[in-house]
Image (cartoon, rainbow, N blue to C red):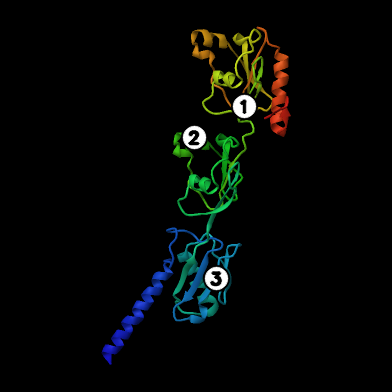
Amino acid sequence: MRRLNLFKAIAVGLATYSFATLALGQTTTSGPVNSTLQPEDALQIAVFNQPQLTVTTPVGKDGYVSAPFVGSVRAQGKTTTQLADELAELFKKKLFLRDPIVSVTVLQFRQLRASVGGAVQRPGTYQIRQGDTLITLLNQGGGPIVDASDLRRATLRHANANEYIPLDIYALLNRGDLSQNYVLQDGDELNIPTEGNNRIIVLGSVQAPASYPYHEPMTLADAISLARGEVPYKSRFSRVLITRPKVGQPGQYVRIVADFTRFIKSGDQQQNLVLQPGDIIFVPQTNTPDFQQIAAIANTAYLINIISTNFFGLKL
């Protein structure tokens, strides 16, 4: 009889140890280590030797769970250990239980989600896992739309945040700049803007004046080549004017004069300027371009970019 009682005591002790371990926050499903509870997590609340208090319940969207006989208790932001300790105190006070052993088990973690929008093949919201990065989300969205996305001006916004984090997806995809490959958080929103101002405009005395996509690196020679070069006996490459929008100052421009003739004749690379998105290149017919005309063209180009209409019959 004594031996039977000893085995019984050991069995009870092991069961008690099992529940005590659960009360320390261990869960029966895989998930983030030391993570806190979030809305839509599915929980099981149990009290050792009190089956009437066992319940399966989700964490509501308001962050609360409904516990047996004690009402709603905030769970969001707490670990399973913290919630189990709080419930134990509530069961003591309201149900007069003596040292209740409470376990809180996560049956299923809420699905983490992030969204990608803008100039991607499949904009939408996608399920993610802990440790996934921007590359994962971008791939789920089918990747950027070629020649329609402005990869240098992408943004990332965390859930419930007003700040937009600037991203250079071009550097990530084409240069391997992993500093841009942020680890995703639940509720993140990635936006790849449409090309918009990610173009250059070549006007004046060239064969094919038009708006052209900007691709880094791009030089003045590249732009003139796209416009099919000079108009014989009319183009004055010695006074090529580049009008460049000032960053953060809408309607304000920097004007740069390049002697492209020196580049052609003597290979002067300083005259083959590196272009930036939004640059307007004007090849005059005379040595003295009409700066008022250029200013009007620049301001018109800016306004047209904003409202996405046609400029001199050319789609920007």
The answer to which of 213 and 298 lies nearer the viewer is 213
Residue type pointed to by label 2:
Ala
> Which structural element holds mark 2?
helix
The residue at which mark 3 appears reads as 57
Left or right, 135 with respect to 291, comes to left
**Residue in the picture at 49% in, 65% down:** 108
> Which structural element holds mark 1?
strand
- Determine crowd level at label 3: few under 14, some 14-19, many 20+ residues with C-alpha closer than 10 A: some
- Determine crowd level at label 2: few under 14, some 14-19, many 20+ residues with C-alpha closer than 10 A: some
82 shown above or below 165: below
Quadrant where the C terminus is found in the figure: top right
* Residue 58: image location, x then y, percent: 55, 68
Residue type pointed to by label 1:
Tyr
Of marks 3 and 1, which one's residue comes earlier in the chain? 3
Query: Do tag 3 and tag 1 residues touch (Cβ < 8 Å)?
Result: no
Quadrant where the N terminus is found in the figure: bottom left
Residue 31 occupies quadrant: bottom left
Of marks 1 and 2, which one's residue comes earlier in the chain? 2
The residue at which mark 2 appears reads as 171
91 shown above or below 80: below
- Determine crowd level at label 1: few under 14, some 14-19, many 20+ residues with C-alpha closer than 10 A: some
> Which structural element holds mark 3?
strand
The answer to which of 109 and 152 lies nearer the viewer is 152
157 shown above or below 101: above
Left or right, 18 with respect to 161, comes to left
Q: Nearer the viewer, mark 3 or mark 1?
A: 1
The residue at the far left in this view is 3
- Between marks 3 and 1, how big is the CA–CA gap? 58 Å
**Mark sitting on residue 155:** none
**Mark sitting on residue 212:** 1
- Between marks 3 and 2, how big is the CA–CA gap? 45 Å
